[in-house]
Amino acid sequence: MKVSPPVALATGGQECDVSNENLMTRRRLFMKLGILFNGVVAAALAVPIVRYLSASATRAHRTLPWVALGSLKEFPEGETRLATFRNPIVTPTDGQTADTACWVRRIEGQQFQVFAVNCAHLGCPVRWFPQAGLFMCPCHGGAYYRDGSRASGPPERGLFEYPFKVENGVLTIQAGELPTPGTSAPPSANNAQGTPATFFKGPAAALTAATKGQRPPCA
Amino acid sequence: MRLIAAVAEWFDHRLGLAAPIRDAAEHPVPRNTASWFYVFGSAALVVFILQLVTGTLLAMVYVPSAAEAWSSLQALNHQVAFGWFIRAMHGWGSNFMVAIVLLHMVQVFLFGAYKFPRELTWIVGVFLLLMTLGMAFTGQIMRFDQDAYWGLGIGASIASRVPVAGPTIVGLMLGGPIIAGATLSRFFALHVFVIPGTLIALVCLHVLMVLKLGINEWPMPGRLVKRATYERDYHALTKSDGAPFVPYAVWKDTFFAAFILLAVAGCAWYFGPFGPTGQPDPTIIQTAPRPDYFFLWMYALLSLLPPSLETPALLIGPVVAIAALLLLPFLSGEGEKSWKRRPIAVLTVLLIAITLGTFTHLAGYAPWSPHMNAWSGDPVPDQMLKGTTALERQGALVFQGKQCRNCHALGENGGERGPRLDTVAVRLTEDQLIRQVIQGGGNMPAYGKNLSPAETTALVAFLKTLHPATQTPARDASREAVIGNGPGSPDRGSLAAREGGAEH
């Protein structure tokens, strides 16, 4: 395990260089060429590896698909109900995790708000309390009004909303991505005035008029 | 015996490992380091090996698929012979490993062992701590239940707040657009290949440096570390007052390691495995996810920070903390080693320990979370209804029915998100109560849209009765001055009714 003193090594190397200068230069050139060759191969291999790893970070679905939530009859006017759907983007090993829940608020007629269950703070599932007219989060105590706007607690914005449309008497929403505070649109200018933030840019803005009347007097 | 010696000689002739192993084992250490304070490092290594063994055993049954992981854990718990015990050993081993690594770090810090020339040993140690915490977090996800699922959501929500790169990081972390099969698979790869591989490499480096630089001598107050002289002095010390590590010091390591293994096994046997809790089905929203023990303080911090400070604290805090740990040996690489003469060091450790302990304790009962079932589960205490009017009782019903109880305790029960209301009438006048209920404020939602005028009147009438018998409710003096408050006024009336009731 004894290592020879570094000084001896260094002088040995120099002697070698001096005595076999030409030979060593050629050998060293080959060695460097070999390293360079490896570098080229590594760079070529890096392309598929990086593409493989980053595939999940680049969104394959620019526009998210539409998913049916159910017939309008399932959502009585003036009520907020839990609906579930199978995430439209799935892989064979997803199992139950691709089943997703959302809160559907039918204001009246074909006016809806569809909220993600994920709290806008850190994503825990919020629960609807119809008597209090509040969504409450079990994790860090965030609360939201019936229109999804922030009521209290740590969230900095209202609940995330899915764009919706009604087709042939069926409520459909545009979904497929986990809504998080950073990946979804920040609260719009409208939100500051009283409408809930929208997760996806969509027809929710049309609800402004419908939801304005629901605001508490102090907000 | 001769045969064994011959076989050993045959191997050693080819491996040449006997001499270096003997050198390492018998290297001289200062006699006073043969102490019970110096056993944490080796214990951490032993628990790590336990984790490698039990983890490998679990991987023989566990299925890293979002569709089947939970069922395979059930099979481990209930079908495979001693599957529950191996799971419990692995789970408790992880808790012990984090605890021992932290103890080891505190000991090294207080004994000044990070100072010259052991700065790099400390730095590698910091990365070992981060890897250990990484194992704890990814391990919690392997237990693919509700807590794991929503824990991933919390991780993604935090990661998404990184400016610009947030969405990319979330995509890399989840492996897809949602928390699903790809997410579990990549955390499995991290937990089973990437982080343990890095850990093994760093542990080797860490131990190699301990052998090369020698174990930190017992710090003597007043014996200062100087770059110019330290190594010479240390070698002189090991010559004059040294003893071979094996067996002079190692016996304490072996005893402590065995004790720790026994403690892990004891906890595993007595308390059993951790979970899994409910199935990882995102449509089951009746869940209150909680992180594992060592991340509870973060859970508390995330609830208690003001919203505006949260994102900066989440993103900058860890960077500052890690940078501080990495820079420590460069900022105080020389000087006093003994904790007896480093009061700031001792206070820092105490402050961090008390802070983390307090946050962990708070997270144990999470006063910031509404009690989701309090409104229907915890009745209004009888004595609060004694002698009340019909209107006040109606108010008590409104109080329960509108889920006020989820955030406000009465008596011993109810949520702690808002203040207890046992004596609210002493603090707030009637007008203030009405305003608070209707408009909210101070972190309370506004209930104006959810209460009819009649309900508000009843609720406030009930709240006005909530004061101790010996204390009068709050009065609005200015109002009395302007419009008077005669004996027939509602305030006096309800007070009289209550006091009358108390006499019965």
Image (cartoon, coloured by chain):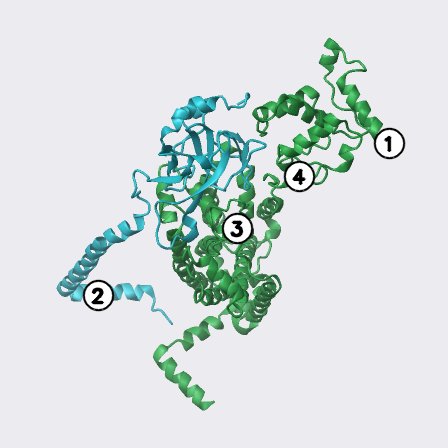
Front residue of this view, candidates B150 and B254: B150
Looking at the rendered structure, the kind of residue marked 3 is: Gly
Q: Which residue is mark 3?
A: B335
Q: Which residue is mark 1?
A: B504
Front: mark 3 or 1: 1
Residue pictured at 70% horizontal, 36% vertical: B410
Q: CA distance from mark 2 to mark 4?
A: 85 Å
Chain of residue at mark 3: B
Q: CA distance from mark 4 to mark 1?
A: 28 Å
Front residue of this view, candidates B161 and B10: B161
Q: Which residue is mark 4?
A: B414
Query: Could you say whether the residue bearing mark 1 is in a helix, strand or loop?
Result: loop
Task: Place residue A8 in its image quadrant.
Answer: bottom left
Report whether residue B424 is seen.
Answer: no
- Please check whether the numbered discs 4 and 1 fall on a single chain: yes
- Please check whether the numbered discs 3 and 1 fall on a single chain: yes
Output the letter for the chain in green. B
Q: Which residue is mark 2?
A: A15
Q: CA distance from mark 2 to mark 3?
A: 43 Å
Front: mark 1 or 2: 1
Lower position in the chain sequence, tag 3 or tag 1: 3
